[in-house]
Image: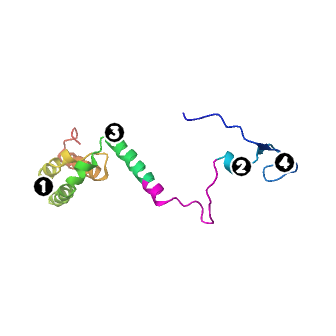
Amino acid sequence: GTWAPAKEVESHKPAGSGSWGVYERPADISKAYGGGRRIGVDGYQPSEEEKDLQRRKTMEKLNAYRRSVGVDRVLEGEHQQDIEDAVAQHDVLMSKVRTQQAIEVLEAVTQWTSFRSVLGGQVYLKLALAYEQTGDRGKA
């Protein structure tokens, strides 16, 4: 951790009861507790640099998590149009009861998808339903 013992600060013990009561406290609370920011009526407003830094940190953590669970959004993003076209073609084929052809269309794009993404989940769900319709429960 980064904990360090508190620095010795000049303390103040009020005589009467105020907002902090009669307990001993630092003489300059802002300095002792890291104050110094002026917060207006609208509350604390981070600067654009702070917002950008926080966004970058969040995206780095999110991408690291996605990689750790097997979601390759880059590969899926590169082939997104192909995947969406395959899903649309699958829907047309299923409406015409050409289940085997619909399965082949979706199987062709599973190499670019992950069942843990929204689009990939849609592909695998439709594929499982098509397998179920053909009676191949093992693959479903």
Q: Is residue 37 magenta?
A: yes
Q: Which residue is mark 3?
A: 68
Q: Amino acid at mark 2?
A: Ile
Eye-nearest disc, 2 or 1: 2
Q: Looking at the picture, does residue 102 appear above or below residue 68? A: below
Residue 54: percent from the left, percent from the top? 45, 52
Q: Earlier in the sequence, mark 1 or mark 3?
A: 3
Eye-nearest disc, 4 or 3: 4
Residue 87: percent from the left, percent from the top? 20, 56
Report the front residue among 120 and 36: 36
| Gap between marks 4 and 1 measured at Cα | 84 Å
50 on left or right of 7: left
| Gap between marks 2 and 3 measured at Cα | 44 Å
Q: Looking at the picture, does residue 53 appear above or below residue 43? A: above
Q: Is residue 83 magenta?
A: no
Question: Quadrant of the image for the C terminus?
Answer: top left
Q: Earlier in the sequence, mark 4 or mark 3?
A: 4
Q: Which residue is mark 4?
A: 14
20 on left or right of 61: right
For the point 14% across and 52% down, which residue is it? 105
Give the secondary structure at mark 3: helix
> Which stretch did the figure color magenta?
34-52
Q: Are marks 4 and 3 in contact (CB under 8 Å)?
A: no
- Look at the magenta stretch and give its main secondary structure: loop
Q: Which residue is mark 2?
A: 29
For the point 37% across and 46% down, which residue is it? 60
Q: Quadrant of residue 41?
A: bottom right
Q: Which residue is mark 1?
A: 98
Q: Amino acid at mark 4?
A: Pro
